[in-house]
Image (tube, helix red, strand yellow):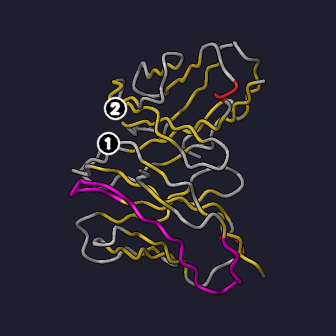
Amino acid sequence: DTGVSQNPRHKITKRGQNVTFRCDPISEHNRLYWYRQTLGQGPEFLTYFQNEAQLEKSRLLSDRFSAERPKGSFSTLEIQRTEQGDSAMYLCASTPLGLSSYNEQFFGPGTRLTVL
Amino acid sequence: AQKITQTQPGMFVQEKEAVTLDCTYDTSDQSYGLFWYKQPSSGEMIFLIYQGSYDEQNATEGRYSLNFQKARKSANLVISASQLGDSAMYFCAMREGDSGGGADGLTFGKGTHLIIQP
């Protein structure tokens, strides 16, 4: 299967700990997005990469959050000093760089974070 | 103000009936794109259908169609002949400034929980 994959699928951590999530996009998809989805809400955009360059960051992405995509393939999202409010599903999506007017975003299964 | 408004938190529909899920949006951009995604209980977001702001015809994809009323800023999803497997959360989303290439992040509504009853 060549869809978007995310690891781990679930993460339970204690408040104050650091966590890191990984996203592997569909092969040759240049653009990669991170979203956060809390219970009962739609996903909220966090940041996006084109190849290895981080081109946009939402104001939701506080200083405790950092995302990287060092070789333009997989991406990591790190949360430092986790807080209970960080508990959410973290979704990754990818899309190819193309001439299509819309470029559907393909989503991964998400990483569910629980901060105790 | 909410950029995407979905006014139906939940809906119950009989199997085989058609269902309309409401979505209104707010943007000052002339160029934008509207999406519908389905999220089953497994959590993965599944793309259903897309409508560009300059598309003159309503988009259709199999049993899904998008009723696009630009002047009213509405983009309702219509599912014909609903099936039990259609039970899921449905999200309307928008990308503003859709100048081609689709770079920007999507703004999602809060979703509608659709339950299809046998």
- Chain ID, mark 2: A
How many numbered marks are there? 2
Residue B22's x, y, as percent? 50, 70
Residue drawn 42% across and 74% down?
B66
- Chain ID, mark 1: B
Residue B1's x, y, as percent? 41, 50
Residue drawn 42% across and 60% down?
B35
Kindly indicate whether the residues beneath marks 1 and 2 are on one polypeptide chain.
Answer: no
Label 1 to label 2, Cα distance in Å? Answer: 8 Å
**Residue B67 vs residue B23, the one in the foreground:** B23
- The residue to which callout 2 is attached is A50
Per the image, is B25 magenta? yes
Q: Are marks 1 and 2 in contact (CB under 8 Å)?
A: yes
**Residue B72 vs residue A98, the one in the foreground:** B72
- The residue to which callout 1 is attached is B103
- Say which amino acid is labelled 1: Ala
- Say which amino acid is labelled 2: Gln
Residue drawn 39% across and 69% down?
B74
On screen, B10 above or below B1? below
Q: Which residues are magenta?
A: B11-33
On screen, B78 above or below A10? below
Graded by Cα atoms within 10 Å as few (under 14), some (14 to 19) or many (20 or more), the crowding at tag 1 reads: many
Per the image, is B35 magenta? no
